[in-house]
Image (cartoon, helix red, strand yellow):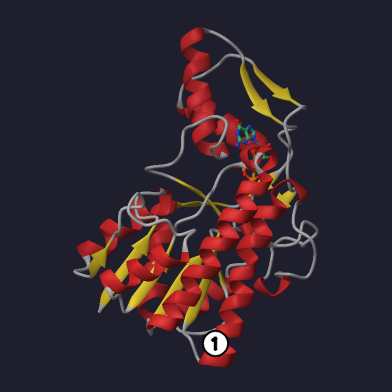
Amino acid sequence: MRYLVTGASGFVGSNLVPMMRVRGLDVATPPSREFSLLKQLDVWRLLNQYDPDVVVHLAGLVGGILANKTRPAEFFYQNLLMNTVLMHESWRRGVKKYVTLIGGCSYPARAISPIEESALLKGYPQVESAPYSLAKAMGVVQAQAYRAQYGFNAVVLVPGNLYGPHDNFDLDTGHVIPALIRKTRDAKREGKALVCWGSGAPERDFIYVEDACEAVLHAVLHYDEPEIINISSGVSTSIRSLVSEIAQLLDFDGSVEWDPSKPDGQRVKVFAVSRMVERLG
Ligand code: GDP
């Protein structure tokens, strides 16, 4: 079997691809500068050149809550277009299996935690990231449609808030854990206060990226069903307690301030993980 991974140099890709290679899988990672996934002809050329049996689509325009709030049009257009075109061309080319990820932010803003997979598309997502979230959620609609009409084996997985090696430490576009690690280090060095976003009250469900990749790889190899699967820890952590834990680990005993001009996002986002346990072991 030949595997093609898009977004191999991204956060998930740079953890997943080495894991696949250690298992002896034949993995191609096309350089993004040679193929624009926004152009149908490039996507066609890509599939023609690599001729994969399985496509693992991880490429996307991604970012934390602020990046989503400031660039909603780009997040909508690029993600919707590349996902739609790549799945379509993969089906046309006769790819045997297609696996992709969407964000936990695709669930409705009012979904009750722990969020079951059945909650998807039952309400509007958190408004700050809705253009991204809905563009990604359309991948689930497309997967179901292509499975129903063409019998195409498209699998969609929903990881929780990932953290770990190769994370994005940019303060404007990154997620909370790398941002707090960096900001805590800087505050300690400069003897200043640690300024965190929002109120500290939100709760999130964090999962270490290598653990998530183990689950994704298991699904790539063994899961062929239409149901989406949450991949997370199912454990709730408040942002306030995350700040204390990081401060403690980095030996920071300065003051902590909260910047209410920055968005809190969804109040609680914790995932039901029983389907992951059942179906992926
Ligand atoms: P989200 O799950 O899409 O909201 O992803 P984020 O990781 O961007 O944010 C998670 C929570 O952490 C939100 O409530 C943020 O307001 C909060 N937060 C606190 N400080 C920071 C920070 O410095 N950067 C980011 N990205 N989030 C922060």
Q: Residue at x 74, y 48 (%)?
A: 266
Tell me if I can see residue 269 in this picture: no
Q: Position of residue 215 (x, y in %)?
A: 42, 67
Tell me if I can see residue 121 in this picture: yes
Residue 94 lies in what quarter of the image? Answer: bottom left
Q: Position of residue 20 (x, y in %)?
A: 27, 64
Count of residue discs: 1
Ligand 1, seen in the image, is in the quarter at top right
Judge the density around disc 1: few (<14), some (14-19), many (≥20) Cα neighbours within 10 Å: some
Q: Locate the C terminus and report the quarter of the image it occupies.
A: bottom left
Q: Is mark 1 within 8 Å of ligand 1?
A: no
Q: Give the left or right position of residue 202, taking residue 22 as reference.
A: right
Q: Amino acid at mark 1?
A: Arg
Q: Give the left or right position of residue 258, taking residue 41 as reference.
A: right
Q: Residue at x 51, y 19 (%)?
A: 252
Above or below, 60 against 48 in this view is: above
Comparing 101 with 208, the one in front is 101
Above or below, 107 against 15 in this view is: below
Residue lying furthest front in this view? 41
Q: Locate the N terminus and report the quarter of the image it occupies.
A: bottom left
Check disc 1 and report the residue beneath it.
147
Q: Give the left or right position of residue 134, taking residue 89 as reference.
A: right
Comparing 158 with 36, the one in front is 36
Above or below, 30 against 202 in this view is: below
Q: Secondary structure at mark 1?
A: helix
Q: Residue at x 40, y 49 (%)?
A: 10
Q: Position of residue 92 (x, y in %)?
A: 44, 82
Q: Residue at x 71, y 34 (%)?
A: 200
Q: Position of residue 272 (x, y in %)?
A: 63, 66
Residue 261 lies in what quarter of the image? Answer: top right
Residue 146 lies in what quarter of the image? Answer: bottom right
